[in-house]
Image: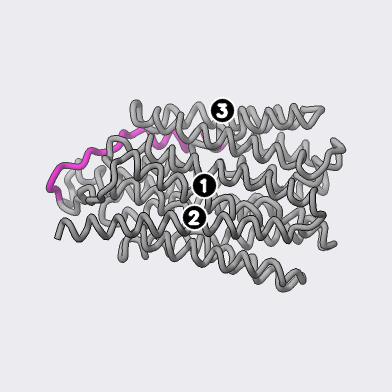
């Protein structure tokens, strides 16, 4: 009710929307940890004199640290709330960028990316999504996908900013500047999120009970893990290697960074749209639509490698896949207990991140073997089919649960 302090700061309240806005800004800034390494990959490869697979390892290490952090920080927020783990993560992220800028070998760069940058970035993804899901019932799909859009907004902004800084000062200066900027901006934002998550009262207005499904929580978790790993093995090929791909085609780093930004900006639109769609038709059906469209868009990369066509295909790819990953978090909240949200969301998103990590490395490895990215795109499509199989099984089980309830 208006004027009621508890409601003003509770589920679906005005404060919940303010918190969502702060969370989105925090994720956009902290998301630099996911995308900076993609932009500097060609420069790092040239400076350290390594092949494409070795140059892809810092990204893989970043995603491994990011994946582990989603589980570790997710468990921490279930116990102590969001802001304390997030504060520690922001410090680790900033330290990682600063140390990476000082490294003298690909091994040192890889360790800084994995142990500090990846781990530090994790607080702005799965844990942040889990936290914001507690603040919304009626518009949970929109809220979750909006919070998840921060990582894509970061992908739309940072790949444009970083090349300009690199052009004048080099990648090392760019990394050090990002570290300082993240520390100066993320700490105040995290401190604005100190209020604990509200507890939903049974039968309260707009409450959403856990939906029935003839699967144990462990079995449902495993199915989501398989689906998440498969979709992100496919997703990683364009997202991780589009800059290097454009370099090989003679279009340059700036063109590839532009395509990555377009891809991720379109992903923001896709994520928000998927949130509205999930609130109307359910997260499982929304997930199936996004995964099928991603598979089709990956096919387009193989025959269309002209500059103009790559811009168009990158736009299509972004519009296709942007809403996929947040749907896993919505499914967890729809079918599993709220008190386990941080841990459960963290585990599922860890699988998606491992898919990005392994897929990013595997695409580089396939490139080194074949001298072309065509086979890497086909590998991504094969993993996308694994993802679609798992989602169809999940949809079948969800329908069984709905029919049993009726």
Q: Residue pushed farthest left? A: 203
Q: Residues within 10 Å of mark 1 (few under 14, many from 20)?
A: many
> Which portion, as a residue range, is magenta?
185-204
Mark 3 element type:
helix
**Marks 2,1: beta carbons within 8 A:** yes
300 relative to 178, above or below:
below
Q: Which mark is residue 387?
A: 2
User: x, y (%) of residue 370?
Assistant: 80, 54
The image quarter containing residue 274 is bottom left
Q: Residue at x 35, y 26 (%)?
A: 80
- In the image, which is nearer the foreground, mark 1 or mark 3? 1
Decide if residue 242 is on the left or right side of residue 298: right
Say which label, 3 or 2, has the lower sequence index: 3
Crowding at dot 2, Cα within 10 Å, few <14 / some 14-19 / many 20+, comes out as: many
Which residue bears the numbered disc 3? 91
- Our reading of the magenta stretch's main secondary structure is loop
Q: Position of residue 55 (x, y in %)?
A: 76, 40
In the image, taking residue 246 as reference, residue 330 lies left or right, namely: left
Residue sitting nearer the eye, 101 or 141: 141
> What is the quadrant of the C terminus in the image?
bottom left
């Amino acid at each position: 009710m208006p004027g009621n302090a508890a409601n003003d700061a509770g589920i679906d309240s005005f404060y919940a929307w303010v918190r969502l806005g702060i969370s989105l800004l925090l994720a956009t800034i902290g998301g630099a940890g996911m995308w900076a390494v993609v932009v500097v990959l060609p420069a790092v490869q040239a400076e350290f004199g390594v092949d494409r697979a070795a140059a892809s390892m810092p990204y893989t290490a970043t995603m491994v640290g990011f994946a582990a952090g989603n589980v570790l920080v997710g468990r921490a927020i279930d116990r102590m709330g969001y802001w304390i783990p997030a504060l520690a993560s922001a410090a680790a992220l900033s330290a990682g960028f600063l140390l990476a800028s000082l490294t003298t070998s690909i091994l040192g760069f890889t360790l800084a990316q994995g142990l500090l940058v990846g781990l530090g970035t994790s607080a702005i993804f799965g844990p942040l999504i889990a936290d914001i899901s507690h603040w919304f019932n009626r518009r949970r799909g929109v809220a979750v996908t909006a919070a998840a859009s921060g990582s894509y907004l970061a992908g739309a902004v940072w790949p444009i900013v970083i090349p300009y800084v690199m052009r004048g000062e080099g990648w090392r200066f760019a990394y050090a500047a990002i570290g300082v900027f993240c520390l100066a901006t993320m700490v105040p934002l995290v401190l604005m999120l100190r209020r604990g998550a509200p507890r939903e009262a049974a039968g309260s207005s707009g409450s959403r009970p856990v939906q029935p499904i003839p699967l144990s929580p462990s079995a449902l978790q495993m199915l989501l893990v398989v689906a998440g790993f498969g979709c992100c093995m496919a997703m990683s090929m364009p997202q991780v290697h589009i800059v290097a791909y454009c370099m090989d085609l003679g279009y340059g780093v700036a063109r590839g960074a532009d395509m990555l930004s377009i891809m991720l900006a379109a992903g923001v639109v896709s994520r928000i749209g998927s949130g509205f769609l999930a609130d109307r038709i359910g997260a499982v059906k929304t997930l199936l639509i996004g995964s099928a469209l991603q598979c089709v868009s990956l096919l387009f990369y193989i025959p269309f490698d002209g500059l103009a066509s790559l811009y168009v295909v990158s736009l299509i790819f972004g519009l296709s896949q942007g809403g996929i990953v947040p749907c896993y978090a919505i499914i967890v909240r729809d079918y599993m207990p709220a008190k386990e949200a941080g841990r459960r969301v963290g585990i599922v998103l860890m699988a998606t991140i491992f898919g990005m990590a392994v897929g990013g490395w595997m695409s580089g490895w396939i490139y080194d073997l074949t001298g072309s990215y065509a086979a890497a795109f086909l590998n991504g499509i094969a993993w996308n089919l694994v993802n679609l199989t798992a989602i169809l099984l999940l949809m079948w089980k969800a329908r069984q649960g709905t029919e049993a309830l009726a």
